[in-house]
Amino acid sequence: RVRGDGPGRTIDAGTQLALPLPLPAAPPLPALGAWDAMIADYRTTGIATATHPVALLRGELDAQGAVGTAAFAGLSHGQKVRVGGLVVARQRPGTAKGIVFMLLEDEAGTINLIVSPELYDRHRLAVRTEPLVLADGIFERHPMSGGQVNVVVRRIWALEAPERPRALIKDFSPLDLAELERAGAADSPGREAVGADELAPTGADDGDELAPTGTDDGDFRAVAPAVMSFGQGRRR
C-alpha cells in the first residue's frame, strides 16, 4: 500500500487514480411520441393509463371507414360495418360448433365479434394471435336480446401501428457471387475471375427495399396484454 495525497490516506498499489477528463454532452435523443410512450407504459407496467392504443389509431381507423363503439347508436340491424379494436377476450366453446367469439375494446366501449368456423380456418393467425384487428361484417342488434350488439364477421385482418419503423435491407448478393467466382478462379488455372461490377445489375441500388423489422420497439405485439381465452375444450 502507498500513501495517498491526503493526511492518513492510503490506496492499493497499482490503483488507477481518477483522471480529470471532461464529460461529453448528452447525445441528442428523439422526442418520445404518443405511440412510443404508450408502448413504454405497457412494457414497464402492463397497462396504459394515459391513452388507449385504439385512440392513437383512431385517425387510421377513420381513414379506413371503421366505426367506433361511440357511433353504434346510429347503426341499423343488418347494416354492413367495419370495426377495429384491441382483442381482450377470445372464446371457442365446445358446444358452439366451432364458432369463435371475440371481444374487442376501443377507447369508448367493447365490441362482440362472431367468427364462423370457415372464417376461422381462413384467418386463423389473425383471430388467434393479433392483438389489434380490423373486421368487416354485419351489424346485429336484436330487440329480444335487450339491444345486445354483435358483429358477424365476414373478413378479419391485423391492424398495423402507424409509422411503424422499417429497416433498410440491402442486397449484397453480387458481391457474394464475385467472391465465389474469385475463389473458383484461384482453384482452376486458366479461369478468369469476374469482378463485382460485371455481376451487379444496372441500377443495383434500386434493389434496396424497406421491410418491417417485426420485433422493433414500436411493435405493439411485443407488449400487448394477455388475451383472456377460455372455454376452448379440445378445439383451438
Image (cartoon, helix red, strand yellow):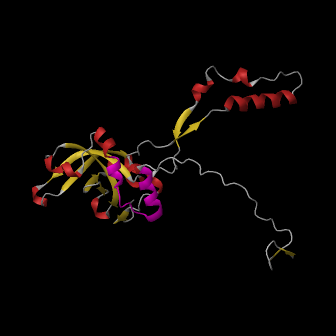
Q: Would you identify the image quadrant in which residue 86 lies? A: bottom left
Percent position of residue 105, x then y: 30, 56
Q: Position of residue 116 (x, y in %)?
A: 29, 51
Q: Is residue 11 left or right of residue 144?
A: right
Whether residue 77 is visible, yes or no, is no
Q: Nearer the viewer, residue 225 or 153?
A: 225
Residue 93, quarter of the rendered image:
bottom left
Residue 131 belongs to the span the image colors magenta: no
Residue at horizontal 51 percent and vertical 51 percent from the top: 217
In the image shown, does 17 or 181 lie closer to the viewer?
17
Point out the stretch of residues depicted in magenta: 35-57
- Residue at image position (69%, 54%) is 22
Pick the residue in front: 11 or 54.
Answer: 11
User: Would you say residue 84 is visible in this rendering?
Assistant: yes
Name the quarter where the N terminus is drawn.
bottom right
Question: Which quarter of the image is occupied by the C terminus?
Answer: bottom left
Residue 232 x/y as whole percent: 36, 64
Q: Is residue 41 magenta?
A: yes
Q: Picture quarter containing residue 17?
A: bottom right
The answer to whether residue 32 is left or right of residue 10 is: left
Residue found 41% across the figure and 61% down from its top? 225
> Among all residues in the image, which is located at the extreme left?
143
In-image side of 84 versus 75 (left or right)? right
Farthest front residue in view: 7
Q: Which residue is depicted at the point 14% across and 47% down?
A: 74
How many tags in the picture? 0
Q: Is residue 36 above or below residue 12?
A: above
| Farthest-out residue, right | 189
Q: Main secondary structure of the magenta part?
A: helix
Please say if 154 is above or below 196: below
x, y percent for residue 38: 41, 55
